Image (cartoon, rainbow, N blue to C red):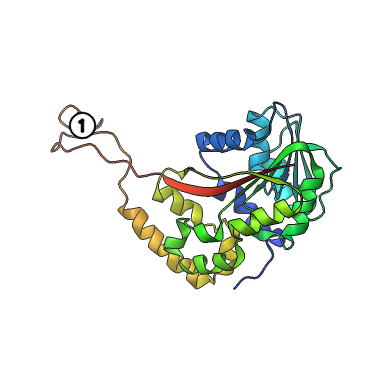
Amino acid sequence: MNTTRVHDDERLAGVYQSGNEMPEESLRDWTRLIGSFAGHRSPAIVEVGAGTGMFCAAMARWLDPVTVVGVDPSAAMLDSARRVNAHPVVRYVAGTAEALPVGDGRFDLALLSRVIHHLPDRARAAREVARVLRPGGAVVVRTTFRERLDALVYHYWPRLRALDEERFPSEAEVVGAFTAAGLTLRTVTSFARPVTSGLREYHARMVSRPQSKFLRLTDAEFAAGLRRLAADARAEPETGPETGPEAGPAPGLAPGPTRGPVRAPAPVEERYDVVVLTA
């Protein structure tokens, strides 16, 4: 098994953006949900564990912030963020969740997206988030709780579920860490949006092993799961024009037997738990 730490993995940084992108509409919906907890317009925002900056750039586009600071320990991730998700109001800086390189009481909104399970000291990270929030500021934790692991990857790579049950915190553990730091629980909710148009696109994305969880599988385990996914992707209906009594043949093709509409593939959705606490 590859035991490389996520923030040291240059290969992962190179494929993370393309392997974890979502449709524009889905990204916008997620960004507006996150921004709805900021409390007022033009917030100052910090993202802890910003990765390649997908959400930093999205928040800059749709939330009209005065500033967005993306913090990440990975030099490779930050290089990618500055290259593919640059924005005039976004600044990317090196740092860890346990020692944020920003001043006290500077931010109205803090985001931790898909990062809480990577933190070696959640209690200390929670205290740091509480330190940098202004009174009334909010922290949004976007994750999947141990008791609600339901991602599609577990269908094709079932051992990942057991591995993630060991490393992902429960709802009680996440809420407990942040309330112990002096923050007040506001809400716990769940939100899902499509990430690909269907299994073919999902398979094309998974080929690059774009998520850190795949580092915990052997090459043989990963290849076996990818074969299962490829088989289902091949069996998926293809998107195409309707062909029926009222639809003529495609240009250049002779008329053939009529048939019903070609079914479109079902979008692949990902669901995440969302915890919101206020200072």
- Let me know if residue 189 appears in the view: yes
- Frontmost residue, 90 versus 255: 90
Q: Could you say where residue 49 lies in the image, as x and y percent from the top left? A: 70, 50
Q: In this view, which residue lies farthest toward the right?
A: 103
- Let me know if residue 73 appears in the view: no
In the rendered view, tell whether residue 188 sits above or below residue 40.
below
Instruction: Give the quadrant of the N terminus.
Output: bottom right
Q: Could you say where residue 172 lies in the image, as x and y percent from the top left? A: 61, 57
- Frontmost residue, 51 versus 226: 51
Please give the name of the residue rendered at 56% of the width and 34% of the height, measured from the top-left corner.
Answer: 28
- Frontmost residue, 238 versus 195: 195
Q: Could you say where residue 249 lies in the image, as x and y percent from the top left? A: 20, 31
In the rendered view, tell whether residue 129 sits above or below residue 173.
above
- Frontmost residue, 193 versus 244: 193
Identity, as a three-letter code, of the amino acid under mark 1 = Pro
Please give the name of the residue rendered at 60% of the width and 52% of the height, measured from the top-left corner.
Answer: 15
Q: Could you say where residue 260 lies in the image, as x and y percent from the top left? A: 19, 37
Instruction: Give the quadrant of the C terminus.
Output: top right
Dividing the picture into quadrants, the one containing residue 155 is bottom left
Q: Name the residue under label 1.
A: 249
